[in-house]
Image (tube, helix red, strand yellow):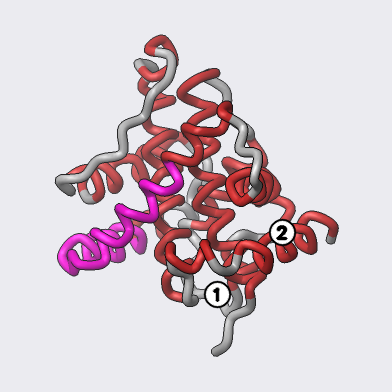
Amino acid sequence: MAYSMEDQTLALAGVFQAAAIVDQIARQGTVPENAFDCSIKSLLRNNVESVSEVYGDRYGLQLGLRELRNMLGKNQDRQHMNTLRYGLTLLFLESKLRKRGDLMDVIRERLGQIEQQATHYEATHQNIIRAFASLYSDTLSTLPQRLQVSGEPRFLQVAENAERIRAVLLAGIRSAVLWHQIGGRRWKLLFVRKQMMEAIQNLTQS
């Protein structure tokens, strides 16, 4: 199946949306509910026929599309540097995870279990978030390379915030895996910037 630039843009926006949510929780202690809901639910949509179905609808990805546009723009705002760092680190971690078939098997198995659990709870219920957070800790956190989150200690030390951060980082990895599966490559970002900016324009106007 051929995938369009809009498909690749949606998946990459999923990565940077997760990064932006993490930054907001860490620095402000608040959660952008619509974006968080979209990202978490993407972890439960694994048997879909299109990229857009992973995210439900593109409106839940508006935060990620804005962050991606900021990253690709010439005048990058220093306020968004943490989001940029987290997003690029997620892409790097996905490349390391891809070489660990054992961890990929654990993730697939545990996601299936969480999908069953989610038939009894809302996707953003604390029990589901805790299960996603535990899965992240048991897999991605065991890699030699770690994603270091910076922010306000009074927010980072709240257990619920820590679980939300790990859960949404797992969603970011899911988007990074998808992006790679449909042809996304980091080096391509140097050469398809214009096409991706046009795709963002189309996706944010629709």
| Residue, disc 2 | 200
- Image point 61% across, 51% down: which residue? 72
> Which of 169/109 is in front?
169
Magenta residues, dominant SS class: helix
Residue 11 is at least partly visible in this image: yes
In the figure, 153 relative to 95: above or below?
above
**Left or right of 48, for residue 158:** left
Three-letter code for the amino acid on which mark 2 is drawn: Ile
Q: Nearer the viewer, mark 2 or mark 1?
A: 2
Label ID, residue 48: 1
**Left or right of 111, for residue 15:** right
Question: Where does the image place residue 81, in percent across and percent down from the top left?
Answer: 50, 33
In the figure, 138 relative to 204: above or below?
above
In the figure, 137 relative to 5: above or below?
above
Asked whether 91 falls inside the magenta stretch, the response is yes
SS category of the residue bearing label 2 = helix
Query: Dot 2, how many residues are within 10 Å of its Cα: few (below 14), some (14-19), or many (20+)?
Result: many
Could you tell which of marks 2 and 1 lies nearer the N-terminus? 1
How many numbered discs, if any?
2
- Image point 24% across, 40% down: which residue? 146
Question: Where does the image place residue 53, in percent across and percent down from the top left?
Answer: 62, 68
Three-letter code for the amino acid on which mark 1 is drawn: Val
- Image point 37% across, 38% down: which residue? 166
**Left or right of 199, for residue 134:** left
| Residue bounds of the magenta highlight | 86-112
> Which of 187/148 is in front?
187
